Image (cartoon, rainbow, N blue to C red):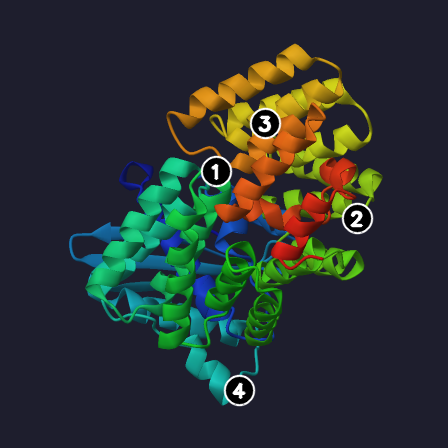
């Protein structure tokens, strides 16, 4: 499923183009017989000159649905084509011309015709889900699409902008389960990507996920979102695993659900299961950059650094500008004692993330390991100055103290991180950067506090 394209480039509406793809992905994913790449995976193919067959090969799929969309007054015209990736032949094509208020009918018709063209033998329940509508309010739907568009860009300003649109969608339709699930995922993203205090976003993420489940228990995305909140804020590992497994039962082809379960396993030190789950997630969404980056992290946490390096380098070939990949690459270089390479990777992560404090703290940590204590202390001072401008997670400060071998300050920072429910503390059991503290009673008490000892 590729983002739809405008008939005339001058009339481009990227949110509608991606939104049509997103809605059809949601519908077709309800069939267990077909694996559909997520919007996050396909959005990189939104260019007007994108070759559909080449995109299909990159996504490692058998068929690609592409199309054109055009708004004229109060009408919407959609031309859709199903293409065989193997030889580029057209399997099916059709044109739909409806009032804009009937966009849902267009999506229902396209999804049904795609199912027919793929010769899917759908059960009664699957047929029902194929035409399921999560809202009948066109304006709420458009706000949801706009929110998804911004949140999935994964930068702090875009995530916050996306949250605003999702909240507007919910105001128009308080029964819109998908909008609540999106709100949960967006708030969760703030905690890791935006130097936001956990108390300002993770309880809100959990509440939104639970509301989505209350409205519609069949939304896998809501259960996977809830699982993250249960480990990152509540430290309730058993409940989180139950939610991740529920998400997988609802949609075994959801890369995000496998990703969520992999996180739970990896953070507890169950490396073999975690690596199998994250590999499955990558196979389902081969160009989803966050999955590729965190597969590298999980291999690194399992001590398989050569494999981690290969995976991360492959991810950079897909997109050299995804900052999380550089962040994980730097961690691997630390274990290989390649300090100049690690500093270069973290510096790139800092640049691409527009100053994420974890990237900055990581630079200070490596400078300390390399014996550059003055440079490491300069990073501490920089983080102190930044903390007067916005929230800086204490975990990122403690990392620098840890590199300087100041165990008391490092542990005090980690204890504050626990007090503030910094989600990064859930990595302490498996992150090798903290190995020098493992025999310290205060560190053991921290692990016990968060349910990892």
Residue at (72%, 38%) from the top-left corner? 434
Residue 361 numbered mark, or none: 3
| Pointer 1 residue | 49
Mark 3 or mark 2: which is in front? 3
**Label 3 to label 2: alpha-carbon separation:** 23 Å
Compared with 30, 363 (above or below) is above
**Label 2 to label 1: alpha-carbon separation:** 41 Å
Tell me if residue 9 can be seen: yes
Compared with 437, 453 (above or below) is below
Q: Are marks 3 and 2 in contact (CB under 8 Å)?
A: no
Compared with 170, 315 (above or below) is above
Instruction: Of the two numbered discs 3 and 4 on the same chain, state the one appearing first in sequence.
Output: 4
Residue density around tag 2, few if under 14, some if 14–19, many if 20 or more, within 10 Å: many
Q: Secondary structure at mark 2?
A: loop
| Pointer 4 residue | 123
Instruction: Of the two numbered discs 3 and 2 on the same chain, state the one appearing first in sequence.
Output: 2
Mark 3 or mark 4: which is in front? 3
Instruction: Of the two numbered discs 1 and 3 on the same chain, state the one appearing first in sequence.
Output: 1
Q: Are marks 2 and 1 in contact (CB under 8 Å)?
A: no
Q: Secondary structure at mark 4?
A: loop
Residue at (23%, 55%) from the top-left corner? 168
Q: Give the quarter of the image for residue 10.
A: top left
Mark 2 or mark 1: which is in front? 2
């Amino acid at each position: 499923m590729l983002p739809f394209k405008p008939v005339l480039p001058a009339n481009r509406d990227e949110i509608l183009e991606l939104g049509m793809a997103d809605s059809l992905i949601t519908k077709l994913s309800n069939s267990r017989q077909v694996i559909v790449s997520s919007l996050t995976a396909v959005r990189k193919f939104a260019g007007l000159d994108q070759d559909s067959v080449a995109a299909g090969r990159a996504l490692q799929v058998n068929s690609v649905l592409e199309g054109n969309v055009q708004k004229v007054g109060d009408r919407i015209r959609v031309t859709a084509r199903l293409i065989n990736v193997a030889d580029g032949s057209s399997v099916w094509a059709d044109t739909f011309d409806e009032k804009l208020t009937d966009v849902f009918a267009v999506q229902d018709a396209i999804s049904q015709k795609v199912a027919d063209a793929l010769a899917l033998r759908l059960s009664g329940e699957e047929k029902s889900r194929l035409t399921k509508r999560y809202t009948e309010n066109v304006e709420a739907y458009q706000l949801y699409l706009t929110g998804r568009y911004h949140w999935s860009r994964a930068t702090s300003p875009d995530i916050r902008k996306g949250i605003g649109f999702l909240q507007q969608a919910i105001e128009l339709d308080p029964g819109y389960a998908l909008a609540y699930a999106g709100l949960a995922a967006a708030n969760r993203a703030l905690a890791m990507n935006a130097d936001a205090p956990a108390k300002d976003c993770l309880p809100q993420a959990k509440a939104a996920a639970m509301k989505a489940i209350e409205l519609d228990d069949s939304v896998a995305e809501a259960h996977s979102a809830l699982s993250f909140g249960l480990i990152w804020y509540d430290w309730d590992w058993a409940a989180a695993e139950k939610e991740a497994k529920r998400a997988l039962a609802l949609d075994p082809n959801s890369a995000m659900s496998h990703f969520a379960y992999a996180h739970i396993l990896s953070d507890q030190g169950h490396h073999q299961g975690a690596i199998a789950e994250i590999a499955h997630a990558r196979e389902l969404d081969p160009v989803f950059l966050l999955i590729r980056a965190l597969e590298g992290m999980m291999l690194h946490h399992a001590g398989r650094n050569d494999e981690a390096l290969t995976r991360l380098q492959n991810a950079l070939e897909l997109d050299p500008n995804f900052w999380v990949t550089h962040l994980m690459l730097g961690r691997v270089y630390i274990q290989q004692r390649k300090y100049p390479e690690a500093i270069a990777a973290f510096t790139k992560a800092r640049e691409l993330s527009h100053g994420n404090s974890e990237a900055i703290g990581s630079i200070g940590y490596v400078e300390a390991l390399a014996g550059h204590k003055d440079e490491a202390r300069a990073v501490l001072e920089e983080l102190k100055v930044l903390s007067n401008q916005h929230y800086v997670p204490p975990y990122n400060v403690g990392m620098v103290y840890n590199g300087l071998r100041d165990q008391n300050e490092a542990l005090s920072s980690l204890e504050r991180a626990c007090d503030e429910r910094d989600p990064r503390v859930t990595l302490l059991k498996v992150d090798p950067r903290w190995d020098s503290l493992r025999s310290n009673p205060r560190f053991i008490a921290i692990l016990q506090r968060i349910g990892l000892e």
